[in-house]
Amino acid sequence: MERLLSPKTSEPFRMIVHGGAGRIPNDKAPLYAEGVKKALETGLQVLKSGGSALDAVIEAVAYMEDDPTFNAGRGSVLNSEGFIEMDAIVMDGSSLSMGAVAAVRRVKNPVRLARAVMERTNHNMFAGEWADRLAEVMGLELADPSYFLTERRRREWEEMRAGKVNPTREFMYSTVGAVAIDGSGNLAAATSTGGTPLKMPGRVGDTPLVGSGAYADNTLGGASATGLGESIMRVVLSKTALELIPRATDPASAAQRAIEIMETRVGGGAGLILIDLHGNVGLAYNTPAMSFAFNQGNEIIYGVGVMGRRASPLP
């Protein structure tokens, strides 16, 4: 179990992002590190310009959806039938408003559709073909399914289908997420994913489920999870971690305890990023690695944490 705590600074806002927890080859670590760093910078620019925490997490996650390094948006993994289905969620901690989408196939940025569901409908979640149609009606950017497919994911799919790679042991759960607190003290969280490789068509994991893939509440904090969805959703991991914050010494301890609960009760690997209502930042994971980035004053701390040593920034 690895955890990392960053103390609150005088900065009027804080933000933390993740690019997934699991296994990651050494040669791809710089891509993950650079990707989360740029996503954080994208979100911080929104906050520095006076934007809300909600605006910031949407832009950070959308950046990672556009980066083929990650398993979200372009770069999503293929299901057992060889096509892509994507999930996303966003939550506003000031009002407890949330929006989510599941199994979408043509939406360029699923996290933007999740926000549209939250702000422009009377519902919380849409799924499948009807979610894609909703995006079209709302004027959101669509893409042909071929846009999302990368050569890397096609090759991985072929190797897994041939039994050359074990998706449970070798896969990097590179779901993406972000949590922010803005200058007004409002929190927001967002998460986006392509799901697990070789999943059955129609399978929906933890990401779009409120309290599992993400949660935000101004009275507690904000959280985003990554990892094995079938385990995360059974313990409602993000909400569980936030409810532990008042009894924990810091957000990292709360995240670590929540993952321990998951391990004990249902097993599985996962990672969590948290910000409490005071702006303290923490993360924890029980997987071999996790990519992350957060701001500490004017400094950006980022990298790919590895089990067995304290997570630290890359040069």
Image (tube, rainbow, N blue to C red):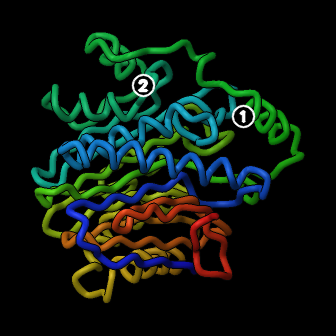
Q: Label 1 is placed on what type of residue?
A: Arg
Q: Position of residue 101 (x, y in %)?
A: 36, 34
The mark tally for this picture is 2
Q: CA distance from mark 1 to mark 2?
A: 21 Å
Q: Secondary structure at mark 2?
A: helix
Q: Position of residue 175 (x, y in %)?
A: 53, 48
Upstream in sequence: badge 1 or badge 2: 2
The image quarter containing residue 310 is bottom right
Task: Kindly identify the residue that appears in the image at 59 percent across and 28 percent down.
Answer: 84
Task: Kindly identify the residue that appears in the image at 50 percent across and 40 percent down.
Answer: 64
Which residue is tagged 1?
A: 153
Q: Is residue 248 above or below residue 292?
A: below
Q: Position of residue 48 (x, y in %)?
A: 25, 48
Lateral position of residue 101 relative to residue 53, left or right? right
Q: Is residue 202 visible?
A: no
Task: Tell me, for residue 2, which label it has, or none.
Answer: none
Q: Nearer the viewer, residue 201 or 306?
A: 306
Q: From the image, which quarter does the C terminus lie in? A: bottom right
Rate crowding at label 1 as few (under 14), some (14 to 19) or many (20 or more) other CA atoms within 10 Å: some
Task: Kindly identify the residue that appears in the image at 41 percent across and 34 percent down.
Answer: 102
Q: Is residue 35 visible?
A: yes
Q: Nearer the viewer, residue 140 or 310?
A: 310
Which residue is tagged 2?
A: 128
Q: Label 2 is placed on what type of residue?
A: Gly
Q: Secondary structure at mark 1?
A: helix
Q: Nearer the viewer, residue 172 or 263?
A: 172
Task: Kindly identify the residue that appears in the image at 19 percent across and 49 percent down.
Answer: 92
